[in-house]
Amino acid sequence: MTTENSNNTSKSKEDEILRNYTDKKTYEVIQYLELVNKSKWTSIKMLILNFINKNKTVVTYDLYIKSILPLYKEKSFIIRKDKNSYGLANIDDI
């Protein structure tokens, strides 16, 4: 099996788990995030999969908003170093 095939298999398993353990609205939000913000989508998807694995429960939209979304926060942001240069700052370092 090639790496691409194993990645597709892994993605399809994850997608199947998300489809089976999230309500329709939550699943639609996850799919929309994949199109709009790939890095945020990856982080939130992993949080949801970990939550499902740990609690063995269906993730409703209310549960997603109250329990999972607060776990996600941006760890870094762009700062302006001087007039012409920018850098990445980590929230934990400030």
Image: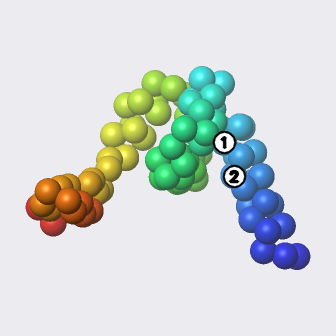
30 sits to left or right of 11: left
Q: Which mark is residue 18?
A: 1
Q: Tell me the CA gap for discs 2 and 1.
A: 6 Å
Q: Is residue 72 above or below residue 88?
A: above
Q: Is residue 56 visible?
A: yes
Residue 55 in the image: x percent, y percent?
52, 46
- The quarter of the picture where the N terminus appears is bottom right
- The quarter of the picture where the C terminus appears is bottom left
Binning the other alpha carbons within 10 Å of mark 2 as few (below 14), some (14 to 19) or many (20 upward) gives some
Residue plotted at (74% across, 65% down): 7
Residue 76 in the image: x percent, y percent?
28, 57
Residue at which label 2 appears: 14
Residue 21 in the image: x percent, y percent?
65, 38
Quarter residue 5 falls in: bottom right
User: What colour-coding does the image apply?
Assistant: rainbow
* Cβ atoms under marks 2 and 1 closer than 8 Å: yes
Residue plotted at (32% across, 47% down): 73
